[in-house]
Amino acid sequence: MKSLPRPVCPRFVSVLLLFAFVLWGGTLLSCRKEPTDFGAGQRAQKKEVELQNKTLLEQFVLAVEELENHADQAYPENALLRLNPWLESCAASRDFQANDEYAARADAFLRLSQTAAEIESVCAKAAPAAQGEGECAALTEDDAKLLPEKLDQFLAELEELNALYRSPLLTRYGAMAAELKKGVSEAGTFQFGGRAKMVASAIARFSFTPLMNFRVISEGAARLAELYRLDRRSFLPEDVSHFKSSVWERNIAAWAKGDTTDPTRQTMNLFRWTCDVIALSDEAESEPIPRQAWQALLTSQGTPLERASVFMGLLRQIGITSFLIKPTDPAREAEFPVLVGAVIPGDEGNKVLLFLPECAVPVPGEEGPRVSDATRGLTFPSIATLEEASQNDAIWRRLDLDGRPFPLTAADLVSVRAVLPTDMFNMSHRMWIMMRESVIERTDAQGDAASFVPPLLAMSFESAKNEIASLPCIASVEQGWEFQTPVVEQTILPVESQILLLPYLYEVPASSSLSMRSDDESSKKYAPTEGAGSGSAETSPTEVKMIHPLWEGKILFFKGRFDTESGAANRLQQGRVPDRLLKQATYNIETQLGEYLNQVQKSQGEGGGSLSEDQIRAAAAQFVNQTRQDIGMKLFLKVTARFYLGLVSYALHNEDAALAHFEDSDLLDKLGGIWRSASLTLIAEIYESRGDYSRAQKIYGRLEGAAALSGKIRAKWLGEAAPAESAEESEPESAE
């Protein structure tokens, strides 16, 4: 049989292979053009999830925009936490940058949490001995050897962290651990009773409290480790504090910066607003609770650093970069005043203007402070730049007082560190995403939340660093760990931060319409109603509701909603509990106590029992203590509302009404003088603005406590710059 020619077979195979390749390629192309359809059900489910996420986001946006309606912190926290599935599904932000320093802090707090948990585990084994149920309980010899090692480790880890934060709370925990270590070490020297037994006895004798123990700091440090994970794609309850600060600062900056478009004047307006509203605290406690920015705003009190934090937050919302100025040698930080540099753009490049929050003044330029008949009061033709202040020592000598030279010279500023107000919130990935995604249009909403444009929630450390590093005199740019101390303390021990909020969570019955006292000049057009005050004006029946006057009034003030029926003045007036009610409550304690005890005994009798004399005394003491606390809270509401009403009138440029509030004798003398210096400062400012320099100078010169330095500097400058007055007016009796 004749065979086929050999070339035919390869050609045939080639054709078959080519045909198969074309078919396979066509299949691939068709797959690429038409993705797999998962069905109408899956598409509907995806749309439903998107709609649900949008609704949840709108609910949270509405909550933070109308926080005056949510004194209960649980609502905005729950609304935020419900967004976690949505946050996880969002695309990553290209603006977020990981930061090794924050990752290191997260690891450090996690180690501290684990060490504290191990110490707590050992101490818990000695708990029966503390309760008299055993001598050495389950404590072993290995535990007795391990405990001193773990205490040393805990102290070392705590010291490393506290070098950054300088936290009074961390210092207290360090002292607690050192004291326990001392007791355990002494117990270990007595070998005759067995090491485990003696260590257990030492632990049992140690006084742990519900707030100061190793379990509390272990749990708190674990939460901080989560907060410091900047790339975490979920919210925590602590994040709500950042939204409060940012939204309030945005609202304030919108009106407090003034009508000017000049960034220097805007910065000066925001600085003056901050110093007027955030009084330097004169707290009697040796260790006051550190305040976050939103807490300083709400309570109108803070340290110089907290005042600086608020000021820098306001600047951030109008796009101005700012930072703390510190010496290159960290050992000299204690003698450095709190000094803020604001980066102001100009035709000839950026310049850094200097501000002193503790002194409540900008650093004057070469011309110094001036007064004129046209402007009235001290003005600053120029504000010193960092470069000028590093070359001209005369700028700083203007701040010298008799016997007290100002602790800065030009040489100190030749080379400085710039410390940025960064924290675990504004550096996080979640805030970058939230700022991008939460532009909400609500055509069905009314008022402030109708269109939500988010505030600046996040910042780029690298961008700010690049902007600042090239400026004159800047040696380095760093993270601002000290700004995070309030968050650190309140995350470990939330109950202390809640103390600050107690007066703002206090409810009072109030009419639904505006209720003004007859002596209030700020809103004469509104008629007084029942319960508004002690005036004898006619009353009209109104619907009564419960409000939180200090909380609602202050947040409306931040929005610039002052003197309207739904404004700040309305809410704050409702908080001014009449004197007659306070006196009546004080005088009637014995009568109320008798009625209370009769009710308690009657209730006990209906149950077939009776109260012993000790139980009656305990119930009486509890009632009297609670009643006095309630009276004290109402007094605080009355006096503090008066101060805030003065701020409202001052913002409205109604100086007569502001003076009527600030010169109130209760405001100046009660509550241990908590508002005295703040009120006198604003009284002096009003007289200064009226050209009554002699009176203003006298009041400034008599300020005490934390406000004394700013008062003395202002009085000195007025004495040097103000024209001689032909006749000096005596000060009002209320300001003496």
Image (cartoon, rainbow, N blue to C red):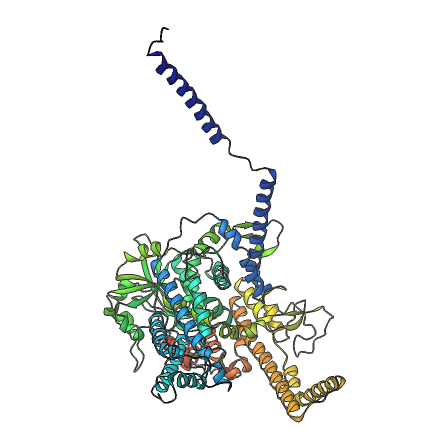
Relative horizontal placement of residue 722, taking residue 30 as reference (left or right): left
Q: Is residue 546 above or below residue 626?
A: above
Q: Is residue 450 above or below residue 554?
A: above
Q: Position of residue 460 (x, y in %)?
A: 38, 55
Q: How many marks?
A: 0
Q: Quadrant of the N terminus?
A: top left
- Residue 587 occupies which quadrant of the picture? bottom right
Which one is nearer the viewer's eye here, 31 or 732? Answer: 31
Residue 431, position as x, y percentages in the image: 45, 56
Instruction: Say left or right for 616 vs 432.
Output: right
* Left or right: 5 as drawn, with respect to 88: left
Q: Nearer the viewer, residue 526 or 722?
A: 526
Residue 534 showing in the rendered view: yes
- State the image quarter where residue 703 is shown: bottom left
Left or right: residue 624 compared with residue 690: right
Outermost residue on the front side: it is: 1
Residue 269 in sight in this render:
no
Q: Residue at x 65, y 77 (%)?
A: 533
Q: For the view shown, which residue lies furthest in the bottom direction?
A: 613
Q: Is residue 526 above or below residue 231?
A: below
Residue 671 in picture, x, y percent from top left? 52, 82
Q: Residue at x 56, y 50 (%)?
A: 53
**Which sits in the foreground, 495 or 649?**
495
Q: Position of residue 633 (x, y in %)?
A: 58, 79
Residue 387 falls in image quadrant: bottom left
